[in-house]
Amino acid sequence: MSSSSFNAEEHKKMLRSYFNGQGFQRWASIYGDDKLSSVRNTVRQGHAVMMDKAFDWLQQLGLPKGATVLDAGCGTGLFSIRLAKAGYKVKSVDIASQMVDKAKEEATKQGVQKNIEFEVNTIESVSGTYDAVVCFDVLIHYPAEGFAQAFRNLSSLTKGSVIFTYAPYNNILALQHWLGGYFPKKERRTTIQMIRDEEMQKAMATAGMKVKSREKISWGFYHTMLMNSSHR
């Protein structure tokens, strides 16, 4: 899907369908405690490394107790629950109702549901005002034009930091994802949309944001760039 052919409504429809169906089963398994194949286990491990670093960055912001954090694309609630346990007030949003239901279930099990507000919504449409915004392994599903639109909305919801992940373009990863098409269907990931440097710079400039810090996370088949951005 190229940016010139990007259709926002069709894209949202595709993501909603995937993450309410096959995607929910795959990612709930990866985010949970199920026994995994060696390929999926590297994704689980890499995701955990990323979340640890992101949480450290968020703590370093020095936000007051009870500060509000938007978890945009919360999935099954792993990071939202961690935030709630640390004393933050969390808004957890996901395009897939199954993901939100699972996040609610897990938050209730761990006794932090009162600190989390759940909502089924897209990262392009979510609203409100927050002390910080986080968005992990979601923007990787957006081509450049959709990425810029979603990032602009997320940036408008806070005067503080937006901590997020994206997939920077490089030839090796492009080849790896192409080869991934030959894996058994049960091992395949959704299509990853890699963003070129000039596209990222344009998206940041349009949103009025700048990079505070970045860290590449690579663990087996999990590859992402973790970014901490703030307003110019």
Image (tube, rainbow, N blue to C red):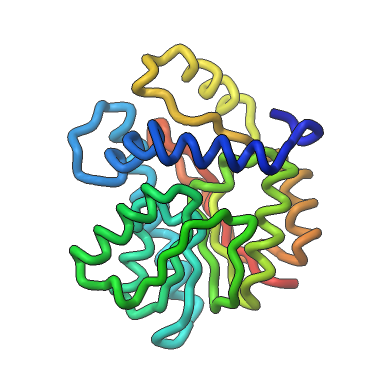
Pick whichever, 184 or 94, lies toward us: 94
Res. 29 image quadrant: top left
Vertical order, 115 against 110 (above or below): below
For this view, does 72 lie left or right of residue 129?
left
Residue 108 in percent (x, y) is at 23, 66
For this view, does 55 lie left or right of residue 193?
left
Residue placed furthest toward the top = 182
Q: Residue at x 42, y 72 (%)?
A: 90
Res. 193 image quadrant: top right
Pick whichever, 97 or 193, lies toward us: 97
Q: Residue at x 37, y 72 (%)?
A: 116
Vertical order, 17 against 151 (above or below): above
Residue 167 in percent (x, y) is at 58, 41
Residue 65 in percent (x, y) is at 39, 86
For this view, does 3 lie left or right of residue 109?
right
Residue 49 visible to an observer of this rendering? no
**In which quadrant is the N terminus drawn?**
top right
Res. 87 image quadrant: bottom left
Vertical order, 30 against 157 (above or below): above
Pick whichever, 124 or 167, lies toward us: 124
Residue 75 visible to an observer of this rendering? yes
Q: Residue at x 52, y 47 (%)?
A: 138
For this view, does 20 lie left or right of residue 109?
right
How many numbered marks are there?
A: 0
